[in-house]
Structures are given as C-alpha cells and as structure tokens.
Amino acid sequence: MQEVGENETAVTEFVLIGWSGRPKARMGLMVFMIIAYLITVVGNGLIVVVVIADPRLHNPMYFFLCNLSILDLCMSSSGVPQSIANCMMDRPVISFPLCLTQLYTGLFFGTTECFLLAVMAYDRFIAISNPLRYMLIMNNTVCTVLASVTWFSAFMLTVVPCLAKPARFCGNNEVDHLSCEFKAVFKLICTDTSMSQISIFFTSTVTLVLPLGFILFSYMRILAAILRMKSGGRIKAFSTCGSHLAVVCMFYGTCIFTYLLPQNKNTRFVDKIISAFYGVLTPMFNPLIYTLRNQEVLGALKKLLSQH
C-alpha cells in the first residue's frame, strides 16, 4: 500500500477472503469451474465455427447466436481462469489494476448479454409474427447495426463511466468474494458513493429491467402469434423460442438475485455461490441449450465433424 494522507493508505492490491477457511469447498468449486470452463470453451467455440462454416446457418437467428457464443467465451475467460487460480490459496492476492480490469470486463460483458438477449427476442418476434418479410426486415445491415449498438451501448454504460470517474480505495483491501465482483469491491470505496449509487440504480434499470420488460412483451406477442398458427408450425416455433426463453430465465434470474434483491446475513453465503456461478453456468449452458434443442445446428455440427 502507499500513503496518501495522514490517516489514509491507497490500495495497491486486494485480498480475496470470500472462501477463506473453506479448503474443501474451494477444491470442489475449483473442479466444477475447470469442467464448466472446458465445456464453455468447446461448446461455444464449436457454435462459432459451425455458424461461420455452414452457409445454411447464415441467417439473422444464427448471426445473433454466434454473437452470444463469442460473448460467452469472453465473459467466461475474463474471470473463470483467475477464479480457478484463486481456489488454490486460502487468501489469494490480486493486484489493483488486474482487479479493476476483471470488474470492468465483467460489467461490460454482462450488460452486453442483457441487451443481446433483448435483440434476440425481437428477432424471434419478427420471424414468427411476420415470416414472409423476415429476411427483408432483418437484413444483413440491420443485424450488423443491432449487434454493434448492443456492444457499443454496453461499453458506454459500464466502462466509460468507470474510467471517467475512477473510484478511490483506501484502508481496507479485503474483498469478501472469490473474485473482484462489483458489489463486493464497491463496499470498499472510501469516498462518498451517494451519486455513484444513483448512477448504479439508473444503469441497473436500463440494463436489467428495461431489456427484461421488452423480452416479456415480445414473448407475449410471440405467444399470441403462435396460438394463431396451425398445430404443425406451433411445435417448431415453441422449440425455437423455448431455447432462448430458457437462457433468459437462467441469466436474468441469477442477475436479479445478485444485484436487485436485498441481501442480509442469511443470504450472503448463497449470494457468493450464485455470484461465483452465474458467470460460469450461463456461458456453459447456452451452447448445450441451443444445440441439443436445435436440429439445424446438430445437423451442421455432424456434417462438419464428418468432413474432418
């Protein structure tokens, strides 16, 4: 640490104490994260390769699915390897720049996924409610613009404000978590955080509540459109939308529990587990959900494997 004032010391590193004194729990968590990370890399990597390699999958739905797989690879790789290394130590130490980098990237990729899931819901709404004009409405330019706006908006809402007004840490440097999770690090800021809390509330509303509201509204319209279909078309529509809805429920459920619900001493340990897992489980389950329920992806994957 470095002295910055008479009674204050600037933080140059953080000590992650969230799982101190729990060696068996850490070892179990480490094994789980290693397996989950391998599945995440292989599963999402295969989706990206299959979508790019197979011309039959060059349509808006798989373009956004490819974006989601790339996003999941980035999200998982930004935090999981470091968390695996932290499980090997009782009191792991992480440098100040590395901790903030992990925090910023986690916020950025998580926010991007919120927006991307909303865009994917819009894509399914257009495909089911207006199938004859689907490829005309969701043309290459529109898809590229939607994906670019999703990534750019997330960057402007998360990374830019943090870099424009960096937080100041002094004194306590013990983070009650296995990684540099936002809520755990935010508690250690030694300056007035009233304006930051207002900004966080606004950002949380924009990134969580509004996209979720849009997704629910889109699926209400989708359900109404499906009910007007013939029985044969309903099954395929339900199968396609069911995969996306499963991902939405899993991702938003863990995020809302972590960031919006009030926490107390009884839920603190559960909060640590969910916070440690939601960045691991969602990227791992996304490729499994989309491939196991999607015959087009499975067919393209079998074709690609048979060629090699």
Image (cartoon, helix red, strand yellow):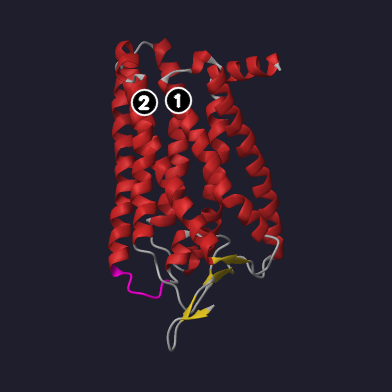
Along the viewing direction, whichever of 228 and 136 lies nearer the viewer: 136
Residue 184 position in % (x across, y down): 47, 65
Residue 191 is covered by the magenta coloring:
yes
Asked whether residue 226 is in view, the answer is: no
Q: What residue type is labelled 2?
A: Cys
Which one is earlier in the sequence, the residue at label 2 or at label 1? Answer: 1
Q: In this view, does 210 lie above or below 146?
A: below
Instruction: Provide residue 146's location: percent of width, then percent of height.
Output: 34, 31
The answer to if 31 sits in the magenta stretch is no
Q: Residue, x 38% and y 58% (percent of image)?
A: 163
Residues rendered magenta in the picture: 189-194
Question: Pointer 2 and pointer 1: residues touching (CB < 8 Å)?
Answer: yes
60 w.r.t. 92: above or below: above
In the image, what residue occupies the spot 54% across and 17% down?
A: 296
* Residue for badge 1: 63
Q: Callout 2: 10 Å neighbours few (<14), some, many (20+)?
A: some
Kind of residue at disc 1: Phe
